[in-house]
Image: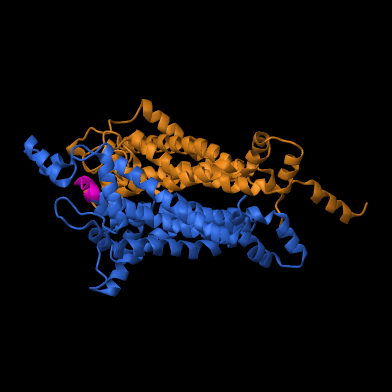
Chain colours: A blue, B orange
Amino acid sequence: MGRFILRRLAFFAITLLTTSVLIFTLIRAAGGNVAAILLGKNSSAEEIHKLSTELGLERPLPVQYFEWMGNFLHGNLGQAFRSKQLASHLIWSQAPVSVPLSLGGLILAIIIAIPLGTFAAKNFNRPSGAFVAVLSQIGIAVPVFWAGLLLSLVFGVHLHLLPTGGWVPWSENFVGALRSLALPVFTLGIVMASTLTRYTRTAILDVMNEDFVRTARASGMSRRVALIKVGLRNASLPLVTVLGLLAAEMVGGTVIIEKVYSLPGISRMILDNVTAREVVVVQSTVMVIVVYVMTINLIIDLAYGLLDPRIRVGK
Amino acid sequence: MSEKLQSVKNSLKRPRKKSRLPLIVGASITLVMVIIGVISMFWIPQDVNVSDPSIRMLPIGTPHHLFGTDFLGRDVTSMLMTGVRTSVIIGASAAFLSLFIGTLFGMLAASISKLDEPIMRTADIFMAMPGIIFALVLASTIGAGYVTTIFALTSFFTPAFVRVTRASSMRVLSEDYISVARLYGRSRLFITIRHVLPNVSSILIVQFTIYFAAGVLSEAGLSFLGVGINRPSVSLGMMLHEAVEQIGITDPLGVWPGLGIVILVIGLNLLGDGLRDYFDPRFSQRVR
């Protein structure tokens, strides 16, 4: 197990480095002259050249990359060209919105989906199971932003139960912050839960046919016990894969939901900075998000190894 | 022969009835949507970009404007038709490209152990790039549009196909009959095509339809954010974006494009489920 963890960690580092090159290239490749955009239309070539030199944008790209990456690894994420605000500060100020929203949605999805999917698989030939299957079908088909619009229409505009958008900082009003996150988290949670329910159902239906479930049944376990004790553990292998995929989907969902509920989160910050050509801030922000997703994936990978000894040993 | 024995015999002979309903409903919905898309290539009631302030915000059911008009007096029926076409084209292209590339690399990773780590780590790299943010950056650097959207969607769908293909192939490869086939002297290629592919195809079919649908949803999401499809092209997500930006969430125009997306996606998913039940014999002899 120790070697397995070490190997995973090594690949974690390599993956992050490769990703950083990709991000850097992508953002700088078709960027146009950053200094020219910063100065506006009425700037002379000399001014542009002067600012470019000042900002260090005239140097070769590899030099800029290593400087950025070196600083990044030391925890210095750079600063905005214009406002001189630290990128780390900008990102950190979005975290109280984006992190609870994304993790809350993911956890809610798991809490809803695993029991519901197991239930649907167990009762696949009964109306109750079919009902859950149909429900998850519909849930999968609903775009996350449309679900958000409809939910805020129902709970906000018509029932006046929850705010339809906007944000109250945690420090100002804890309950207010919870209230403004309630609908977004709920929206993200049920949309992701639909996908996960469907996968859970499929995965468990798949293992229901396996010999070991039949053996468990033959050894005297009831159908329910056999499914939960033997089936769920074996079905967890494909499910863990799906969880990894959901982690990336979670970030996408978060970005869209923040837009729907006009929350001052990571999506608004990225959109603003992409438009303003604050390349260093964008690079660092995207990189932080990548680290976030990669860390979740790493945890899932390690869980993978714990669940299935075959994976741990390798092939 | 006693009556009881006869009834047991009958029940053994009679194949379990398998509902074809999802397949039929799904195929019909998908077909209708595709036909709408194809028609919109040749004919739409009005030009989607011609506005007429004198007929702003006409209600649904107005003659010549079946679904009414938007805040600039543009015909909603035409926009919906064009939007459906955009959804189908982008969803299908992205899912097909991802299926092709993903299955290929997933199988390579599962069957050739030397390639496993490099392929999976590359997939991880792409998977770690959060798709929407990747697309957002891409759209702002090389410009939004059809090609950018399909490219972005493919690059973040493919790893999912690689992972799922590999995971399920590995499960098949750990079965006893694979060891038998190996001992029998079958080549890797033969085992992959003859044993692994048929056994993972049901999962891949479900996966393809899910990602066709996901492509439709993601395109809508990107266009809703304003970084997917923009005027003069029209997409369902873009219509929602316009409706919300201009009038707010209470706008009835926000209903139709969303409903269009939901119907198309449900149709695709039903089609996938139906196809899986149809192709996969294992599911017709399920343990109770």
| Residue A7 visible to the viewer | yes
In this image, B10 relative to A227: left or right?
right
Q: Locate residue A299, reporting x and y percent.
A: 48, 60
Above or below B35: residue A219: below
Whether the magenta-drawn stretch holds residue A279 is answered as yes
**Most common SS among magenta residues:** helix
* Residue placed furthest toward the top: B42
Q: Which residues are magenta?
A: A272-280
| Residue at x 11%, y 43% (from the top left corner) | A51
| Residue at x 42%, y 29% (from the top left corner) | B38
| Residue at x 30%, y 62% (from the top left corner) | A95
Location of the C terminus of chain B by quadrant is bottom right
Q: Locate residue A197, reporting x and y percent.
A: 52, 57
Residue B181 occupies quadrant:
top right
Q: Locate residue A304, reporting x and y percent.
A: 55, 58
Q: Locate residue B259, reporting x and y percent.
A: 39, 47
Residue nearest the viewer, comparing B13 with A311: A311
Whether the magenta-drawn stretch holds residue B69 is answered as no
The number of callouts visible is: 0
| Residue at x 73%, y 45% (from the top left corner) | B179
| Residue A133 visible to the viewer | no
Above or below A186: residue B172: above
* Residue placed furthest toward the right: B1
In this image, A222 relative to A187: left or right?
right
